Image (cartoon, rainbow, N blue to C red):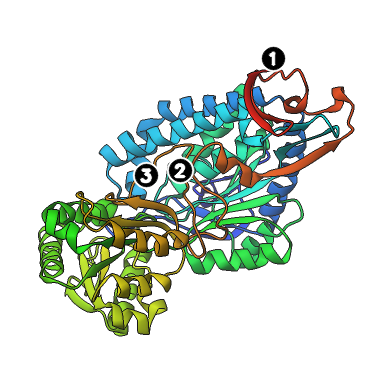
Amino acid sequence: MSTAEKAIRPVLIAGEWRQAKHEHTFKASNPNKNELLPVEFPVSHWEDCDAALEAAAQAAHELRQLPAEKIADFLDCYADRIEAAKDALVDAAYAETGLAKSPRLADVELPRTSNQLRAAAEACRTGNWAMPTIDTKTGIRSCYEALGPICIFGPNNFPFAFGSVSGGDFAAAIAAGNPVIGKANSSHPETTYLFAKEALEAAKQTGLPEATVQLIYRTNHADGERMVSDPRIGATGYTGSRNAGLQLKTAADRAGKPIYLELSSVNPVVITDNALEERCDEIVTEFTTSVLMGTGQFCTNPGLVMLQKSDRSDAFVKAVAEKFNTTPAGTLLSPAVAKSLSASVQKLCDFGADLVTGGGEPESDRCAYANTLMVTTAAAFLKNPEGFQTEAFGNAALIVIGDDIAELCKAIRHLEGNLTGCIYSASNGSDDDGCETLAAELTPKVGRLLNDKMPTGVAVSPAMNHGGPYPATGHPGFTAVGVPASLIRFGKLTSFDNIRPHRLPNLLKDKNPTGKTWRMIDGDWTCEDVS
């Protein structure tokens, strides 16, 4: 093996770190300096994908024979190992993404990551995600079971909490009893490599099949599409750009393989005139804080604001522009993100949006772009609703001003599906009638409806829906955040008809060794101790 080959990060296949089958390599970039980092990563040939799929298929068979407690132990052990490796993970992610070490990476995202792994472990132990259902009259019982190997494509903006071998999709897939093949995001491959090392050690420590977690950094597009449609794959979880996600979806759909996508969202925020009259300064602060947080690189970033035309809406635009001008522009994740943001702003301006502040070209010495605010009318929006919903991923926002509530409702009817939608209203109830009308139009367009609160935070709550109608996601009925609901995506509903008691899954036995669980028995949900 040559010195150059040794310098290239290995892939993780079948429990072993091995040199990839590859011809080409790539490097991540340091966005704070706009320069490439020294470590090289391979672009794997199909041989690597095939070997990972074969190992995952075997691991899936082995995982089905293991008690849920053992899989939960892995998730807990992995969470512990992540916390122990905190410094190395934070340093790597900072170098690759420019995200602040503190509080963002060390104090927010890393604890969230370990906490959601532990929440998934608890769901795995109790089996509540599997919806065990017993009909004693017919002798039929059912529950969700592991689906098979899961391929996960992680995004660029959350290297920990949504990472391909650490994030919410990963935790849900493993807790449902499936092995994972992670495809690292090219923006933070070293961070993903460090996570995979900890995952492998956790698998060894807890006695899981070593191919429970595997890692490939990059493939060509054709092999990625082949991967998600392979007969050995159970399903795919993808978070990223709409264009790439839809190409994968086309391939997966053609093969009849489930794929869960998070793609694009402008997250509309509607602010009534009464709300601005009551607390304009407060709302300006909340909006600018939300839209510029993390340099706007959140999938729940409020990129589209709708206002009623008045002196107060003019004052809102002016005040936001002043804050944008006086707040230093943050660092974007990569040169590709900066280029895409610049192109999206230009498109919106070409469609007729007026540039209030910002715009221009990205900075040259780091990955950054001026805080950008644009404005247009609801009448113009209605002439080209698709164009004005171009997602400007980053520190930019578009304000749409309508003559009245009725015109804003017309604009809302032309919105695509979004992860979130927000209505800011007067606290004294003076605009309740208008807000009810707005909510009736907005609710079908979003996965999460908020009132008097910006959408940027996504709590890890059992009640959370981090999903929504297309193109926010590929399916409106599932969530990527929120245990136990997020696990169902990676399960297969199986019905057991007249099966002898000793052959039933543990969750469906009259004496359930998992202990307390929610079960539906003869039509009634009960939480009982069935140990």
On the rendered structure, is 496 left or right of 355? right
Asked whether the viewer can see residue 31, the reply is no
Q: Position of residue 201 (x, y in %)?
A: 56, 28
On the rendered structure, is 151 left or right of 300? right
Q: Would you say the residues marked 1 and 2 are in contact, meaning their CB atoms lie under 8 Å apart?
A: no
Q: Nearer the viewer, residue 17 or 88?
A: 88
Q: Nearer the viewer, residue 475 or 8?
A: 475
Q: Is residue 184 above or below residue 142?
A: below
- Dot 3 surroundings within 10 Å: few (below 14), some, or many (20 or more)? many
Asked whether the viewer can see residue 429, the reply is yes
Q: Give the distance between the C-alpha atoms of the residues marked 1 and 2, in whole angstroms.
A: 30 Å
- At label 1, the amino acid type is Ser
Q: Would you say the residues marked 3 and 2 are in contact, meaning their CB atoms lie under 8 Å apart?
A: no
Q: Which residue is mark 2?
A: 464
Q: Is residue 233 above or below residue 89?
A: below
- At label 2, the amino acid type is Met
Could you tell me which residue is drawn at 57 percent across and 50 percent down? 152
Res 531 label = 1
Q: Give the distance between the C-alpha atoms of the residues marked 1 and 3, in whole angstroms.
A: 44 Å
Q: Position of residue 76 (x, y in %)?
A: 53, 25
Q: Nearer the viewer, residue 82 or 306?
A: 306
Q: Which residue is mark 3?
A: 93
Could you tell me which residue is drawn at 41 percent across and 61 percent down? 440
On-image quarter of the C terminus: top right
- Dot 1 surroundings within 10 Å: few (below 14), some, or many (20 or more)? few
- Dot 2 surroundings within 10 Å: few (below 14), some, or many (20 or more)? some
Q: Give the distance between the C-alpha atoms of the residues marked 3 and 2, in whole angstroms.
A: 27 Å
- At label 3, the amino acid type is Ala
Q: Position of residue 139 (x, y in %)?
A: 85, 32
Could you tell me which residue is drawn at 45 percent across and 31 percent down? 114
